Amino acid sequence: MTCKRVTDRFAVAPQLSPEALPALVQDGFSVLVCNRPDGEDDDQPAAEVMRAAAESAGMRFHHIPVAGGAFPAEAVAAFGQVRR
């Protein structure tokens, strides 16, 4: 799994697995934002599975689903409300 740091406080990654989250916590990540709508891909874990794994690993979880890579104003506003 490859995370790309965009800033010192923000990184992006392809689809994560629940098993990958403890390693991310070890790397200093404390919040996970999932942008994938449930059911977007057959092999992706559901948001609630990712929420449970994130919380179990000690992370805060936010589900802000977007479709087609388009970030409507509501999604951008939701990102603005995410805190460490």
Image (cartoon, rainbow, N blue to C red):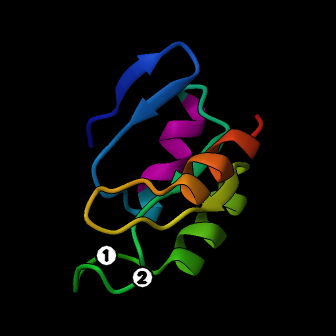
Report the residue marked by disc 2: 38
Report the front residue among 4 and 17.
4
Tell me the residue at 31%/75% (across/down). Answer: 44
Check the image and name the residue furthest to the front.
73
User: How many C-alpha atoms fall within 10 Å of the one at disc 1: few (<14), some, or many (≥20)?
Assistant: some
Q: Earlier in the sequence, mark 1 or mark 2?
A: 2
Residue 60 at x, y percent in the picture: 73, 51
Tell me the residue at 71%/60% (across/down). Answer: 55
Q: Are marks 1 and 2 in contact (CB under 8 Å)?
A: yes
The answer to whether residue 39 is magenta is no
Query: From what the image shows, is residue 77 above or below residue 83?
Result: below
Report the residue marked by disc 1: 44
User: Which amino acid does the dot numbered 2 rest on?
Assistant: Asp
User: Which amino acid does the dot numbered 1 rest on?
Assistant: Gln
Instruction: Tell me: 68 left or right of 46.
Output: left
Count the marks: 2
Quarter holding the N terminus is top left
User: How many C-alpha atoms fall within 10 Å of the one at disc 2: few (<14), some, or many (≥20)?
Assistant: some
Report the front residue among 59 and 35.
35
Tell me the residue at 63%/68% (across/down). Answer: 51
Q: Which residues are magenta?
A: 20-26
Q: CA distance from mark 1 to mark 2?
A: 8 Å
